[in-house]
Amino acid sequence: MALSSCEAEYMAACAASCQAIWLRDLLGEITGSKMQEVIIRVDNTSAIALVKNPVFHGRSKHIKSRYHYIRERVEEKEILVEHISGKEQRADILTKALAKIKFVEMRKLLGVEDLSISIRKLRG
């Protein structure tokens, strides 16, 4: 259980990195090519500092070691962690209640279409 938003973001980034590396390796096996590093975009600068700086330890020593997997992957150049502003964080559509305008904007960024509108256009 996370005690702060920094910890929650850090734990989520770790879980995402585990899944992303598994998918990257699976695609590499299927295609027979070496896949490049995975980019994880995080909107919490404290969580990014925790990932990139193992010495950033004072407030994080209670986080279980299993969540430090992401640090190892960053050191091995398998994961690149980048900051993204909260306004541009596409994952928010899956984790937060958004105002309609913001929801529609994020939905477009994800490439998801409202099929009812498309069907109405076809029926004309």
Image (spheres, rainbow, N blue to C red):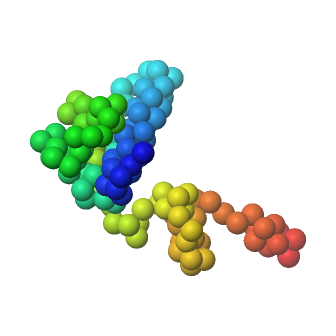
Residue occupying the point 28% across, 47% down: 81
Name above or below for residue 91 compared with residue 14: below
Name above or below for residue 36 compared with residue 84: above
Question: Can the viewer see residue 79?
Answer: no
- Foreground residue, 100 or 56? 56
Question: Can the viewer see residue 117?
Answer: yes
Quarter holding the C terminus? bottom right
Name above or below for residue 48 compared with residue 103: above
Residue occupying the point 12% across, 42% down: 55
Image spot of residue 28 (x, y percent): 43, 25
Quarter holding the N terminus? top left
Image spot of residue 60 (x, y percent): 23, 45
Name above or below for residue 97 compared with residue 40: below
Q: Residue furthest right?
A: 123
Asked if residue 120 lies left or right of residue 85, the reply is: right
Residue occupying the point 16% across, 44% down: 57
Asked if residue 81 lies left or right of residue 95, the reply is: left
Residue occupying the point 56% across, 77% down: 99
Where, by quadrant of the figure, is residue 110 drawn?
A: bottom right
- Foreground residue, 10 or 60? 60
